[in-house]
Amino acid sequence: MLLTAILLTTKLALITTLILLMIGIPLAWRLSVMKSRFRPVIEAVVGLPLVLPPTVLGFYLLVMFSPDNALGNYWQEMTGSTLAFSFSGLVLASVIYSLPFVVQPLQRAFEQMDHGLLEAAAMLGATPFDRFMNVVIPNSLRALLLAGCMGFAHTVGEFGVVLMIGGNIPGETQVLSIALFDAVETQQFNEAHTIAGGLLLFSMVLLVALYSIGQRK
Amino acid sequence: MKINIQLPRDSFDLTVDTSLSLDGIWAIMGPSGCGKTSLLRCIAGLEKKAKGKIVFNSQTWLDTELRIFVAPEHRRIGYIFQEARLFPHLTVSGNLQFAVKRAGRNTPQASSYSWDDIIDQCGIAHLMDRNIDKLSGGEKQRVAIARALLSSPELLLMDEPLASLDWQSKAELLPCLKNIHRHFNIPVVMVSHSHEEIARLADFVAVMEKGAILRKGSVSYIVSDYFDSQAALAPLSPLNATVMGHDREYLLTELDIEGIRFLANQSEKNIGEKVRLVISAQEISLVLDDVQQTSVQNKIGLFISGIKAADDYHQLIDLSLGQQKLTALITRKSAESLNLKTGQKVFAHFKASGLEVI
């Protein structure tokens, strides 16, 4: 049961991180070059999960996932199952919940990017997409690694949202943080110690690694 | 190239309506903040707010009325920035490959110049595997020039390419720039505020002030005139010459300017090659008689075309040399005691070592 939770958590965090990078990289770039007055609004929406109680986010997601609403209805027609209490729902929620942890470090790195290099690339014949892929990305590898790790770690650590929309289904939605809660509830303290200690160790190792990357400038 | 553009700026608007011939090196000169760099950036397409019209050869790069704006990456321009702007994530060779891969972007044929030729002209063969942060300022600029050439441009724009370098790197890179223009026969527009650079490199000069071009023309006239008004006491005379021969015994090179023979210290140039000569006005003394017995190698009879005060105690004497001009600086005392007048014939004396061959 513990192994199932570990595998599920890892799978969730990996898929979420992958999707986050695919959304986060272009979003962070757009934000970094955006001059529109809507920029603070978009930044606020992206940053909401930083300040909002996870249960609030979970509640609204639960409402959206309901087959009475457009998203839930569409999903049910497409797949035949509900989004709530499913792994897919968990992925969607995690993407929203961890978005700022990926977008913000990327946006900061892109804002510090030397735009003189992009002008130089343009004069050498590179189109905007070419410039982004071959100048911006290779010069932001450290930030990409940081953003990926933050997204991964934060997804592993989420609890409130999962509790609201995922429940506690082993192999489907029972991630490590839920399994820990469950173990304590059922007074299985040995298992609780294993999970809690494991998560603590994992977080510590990851953070030490991240700060070492940050230092090596 | 026809340019008719307006670009709003904080202090004043850039308003340029001019045409630049594409058969030499143009220098845009003027005080800092006069809009030189902005003009260059407009030509390159890097100033998106520029309005008006730019036509290069038969290609329209900008026509606001017709809503034409050719993106910088499609203009086939090599741009040398003041800071080399090399890509830090690539080696020297990686930077050059970046340009080569994108060189054939608009035309089916690949780079018009060969890789080896460009590497050779820029003198960077030994740097290929280096990282960018291991290069000196001069080396970086050489790589930037090679990179620009490898993108097979039809026009080279240079924004004070020597400004950030120490004097030794400058002295090495300056002849290199001149050679590149000669060797690849590519039109160049450069921005500079240095009298020395312009006299050595430029064929034509456009003088800018407060966002507009005040004057333009051949370097032999514009450079000294403009800097006189800035009270520069040592204007350089830029002269176009042809190498006629080498005197191996005395290590001298014989040159021809408008049919007149000059001697300079021996240079590496080939016979028949077109070169730029530069001589400082301070190097030239004026003699009324045709004195033959003197140690000075160059004794040339010329007519005075103009006399101007450099400051209260010095005068600049312009001597016409066919279509070109030689300027001498003498004291006001000498000018008065020799009773010099416009149209008078005098003999200009200067040492072979006073002529710099580029």
Image (cartoon, helix red, strand yellow):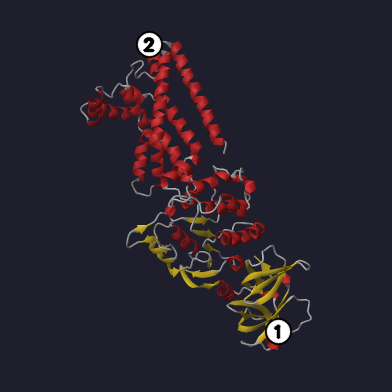
| Kind of residue at badge 2 | Thr
Q: Is residue B213 left or right of residue B241?
A: left
Dividing the image into 4 quarters, which one contains the C terminus of chain B? bottom right
Q: Which residue is nearer to you in this view: B322 or B230?
A: B322
| Kind of residue at badge 1 | Ser
Query: Does B328 appear above or below A164?
Result: below
Q: Which residue is nearer to you in this view: B117 or B136?
A: B117
Dividing the image into 4 quarters, which one contains the N terminus of chain B? bottom left
Residue B39 x, y percent position in the rendering: 46, 63
Local crowd size for mark 2, using a 10 Å CA cut-off: few (<14), some (14–19), many (≥20): few
Residue B334 is tagged as 1
Marks 2 and 1: same chain? no
Residue B6 x, y percent position in the rendering: 40, 65
Q: Which residue is nearer to you in this view: A133 or B8?
A: A133
Tell me the residue that label 2 is attached to.
A186
Q: Residue at x 44, y 44 (%)?
A: A130
Query: Does B268 appear above or below B262?
Result: above
